[in-house]
Amino acid sequence: MNKQQFLNSLDESLQKLSSDERQDILQDFKEHFANGIAEGKSEEHISASLGSPNHIAKELLASHLLEKAERTETTGNIVRAMWAVIGLGFFNVVIVLGPFIAIAALVVAGWASSIAFILSPLLVFINVMLNPDTFILFDMFFSMMLCGLGLFIAIGMFYMTKGFIRGFVRYLRFNTKMVKGGLKHV
């Protein structure tokens, strides 16, 4: 593959990036080719030493999406970054998707329990409306205690969710570095 074919393939694979970012990346690779040619290497040798343009693009996209997820911690950014990292290799399906599902399950369970506890006085009120002769004062006080506990759980879940997101993004970054070349830069 010559220089132009390599750059065209790389440009095609980087279509998800903005035009400016693509041009910066392509300029870096043009300089790499220019340096290699100045050293007496052929374009084919340089492109072979660089590797597959598609794999390079996957790594660059994963890095870009991870940086975006670190800047703006939204669910969409985290999921896009996760899929980009999974796309780096089949092994990552197990290594990345498993922890993501476990963390997501913990977060959903925590929020569901806090919401259920917070809504418990409403359930007692509904029960009193449907069966007025079954009202027990203990039920009202117990549901109020659960509501307070639910509020504490919700506050804790807010901070835990933020921590889980930051930790998972760090894990994705670590995994990307592992795929790119081991632990020498971690």
Image (cartoon, rainbow, N blue to C red):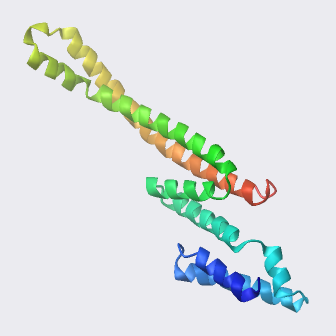
Residue 112 position within the rendered picture, expressed as x and y whole percent measured from the top left: 37, 32
Whether residue 32 is visible, yes or no, is yes
Residue 28 in sight: no
Whether 71 is drawn above or below 7: the answer is above
Residue ID at (59%, 40%)? 98
Quarter occupied by the N terminus: bottom right
Image quadrant holding the C terminus, namely bottom right
Residue in view at x 85 percent, y 90 percent: 37
| Position of residue 135 measured from the top left corner of the image (x, y, whole percent) | 14, 10
Residue furthest right as drawn: 40
Q: Nearer the viewer, residue 158 or 97?
A: 97
Camera-side residue of 49 and 76? 49
Where residue 142 sits, quadrant-wise, is top left
Q: Position of residue 4 (x, y in %)?
A: 70, 88
Q: Could you say where residue 46 lies in the image, as x and y percent from the top left? A: 82, 81
Residue 173 versus residue 3 in the image, above or below: above
13 vs 123, left or right, is right
